[in-house]
Image (cartoon, grey):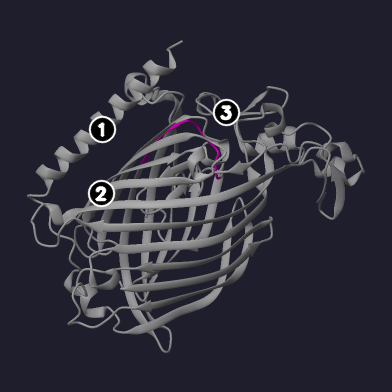
Amino acid sequence: MSAPGNMAARFCRITAGLLGCVLVYCLIGSRVLAAGKLDDYTLKNKKRGWYFTGMPILNLTSDNGLGYGAGVYFYQNGRDEDPGFDETPYFTQLYGQFFQTTNGWTQHMLQWDQFRLGGTSLRVRACVMYEKKINANYFGIGSRTTRRNLEDGNFAVHDSRQHYYRRFLKDDYRNFARGEWWHFVNYKYDNYGYVQPKGYFNLYGTFTDDAPVLKNFEYLAGFQAGHTRISRWDLRGYRVNGRRFVELNPTRINRERPRGYRGGWTNFIRLGLAFSTIDFEPDPRKGVRIEYCMETSHRFFGSDYVYYRNTFGFRWYQTYYKGLMHVIRFAYTTSARNMPFFEMDRFAFFWNREAGLGGPRTLRGYRVDRFVGKTMTLANFELRYHVVDFDVPLLGRFGIKLVAFVEAGNVYDEPGDPFAHPRWDDYRYCYGGGVVVPWNQSTILHAYVGFSREDYSFSFDFEHGIR
């Protein structure tokens, strides 16, 4: 086994090398890539001044069930003569949300997004959020999750979730109808609960607005604080089809007891660097984005854990003809020290911290957090076809886009394994499609369904899957 010092040194060398490749690509690529101006079509249809897009939220996913609530966006787009009007999707976005689902997920938030703060090039994104989930997923941690198929509490392996559900979780309605209650004693084996209030403040900026190369670079400095309280289903009651049962056998999280299974504070700073030529952030049509983000947590910040994480991302948007375009995303994330399991399931991108692998933002043919580890890789390829735009009185302008995608990802135990020991046979793949509806350009609605050899997943929600 490698000494901790050698592992840390190797981790730093890999990080420095990847960051160097990103910077070289940026410097070379910037000579041929266009700046991030809005195209003529977007600029012509962009709304002026203040407006809002408030609506009831109706959300449906495989993991969370039917979601309901309300969300309101307030926008200030400014006027044609305002500096930056032809570059930003909006100047101010205020968002408030009340939301809960039938499968026990609650998420309430207030969010502020401000371009060109005080007339400068700075951008602020801040949020306070209360989140509660009584059926969060835990399928284990590490490369073993992709090396083997679904493994139950008896160490038996199942090729499909349907088989796993019927043979282990005991979805056996014939025996259930005869009153054989023990057929549901493992029903919550892969679930646990958490309550998590948190908030963040991120400051973004550019180095200059004029220099041909530097104006495409962005930097990030931010801080997030949150507390997580974990609860387990062991020896607790629940209901299935109106009847009450008890989780008599140990759940997976109680058997494995991963780091962080008792919860605690996770407070960390975020530092990032990005190179972007994307034309319209909520719904891009062309451009590339290359980014690096580091997160580090210390007891000095009031955290119960000491860890750091590096995340690299690449996205490429290209429109061809008649609204046909492709989107490509590659991502790599790795962590070190004593990161808790409930933070390990993140790709900490520059703008969004996406849960994965699995779910509507990473691998859309698997459940959320199906594959989690210290080091994760991700590849997405998506085709979008813009079918039509139309106006609805009082509501504004809508569009319809058809989407098809193919995605892959893998989990590793060490930061260098994706390059030295990639284990191509262990990559997990999925495919699918759906419909995307842009509303007044900046509010995006999606409906996806994804399929894999193990499972299928669906999502009706806000924003693109690749964002």
Task: Tell me the quadrant of the picture where the C terminus can be found.
Answer: bottom left
Using residue 157 as the reference point, say whether residue 115 is left or right of it: left
Tell me which amino acid carries mark 2.
Answer: Ala
Name the element at disc 3.
loop
Q: Report the disc number at residue 18.
A: 1
**Amino acid found under the numbered disc labelled 1:** Leu
- Left or right: residue 150 versus residue 219 is right
Counting from the top left corner in percent of width and height, residue 462 is at: 47, 64
Mark 1 and mark 2 lie on one chain; the one further toward the N terminus is 1
Q: Nearer the viewer, mark 3 or mark 1?
A: 1
Residue on which the image places disc 2:
274
| Image quadrant where residue 26 sits | top left
- Judging from the image, what secondary structure is the residue with disc 2 in? strand
Disc 3 marks which residue? 149
- The part of the chain drawn in magenta is 368-379
**Which residue is rendered at x = 27% and y = 47% of the image?**
273
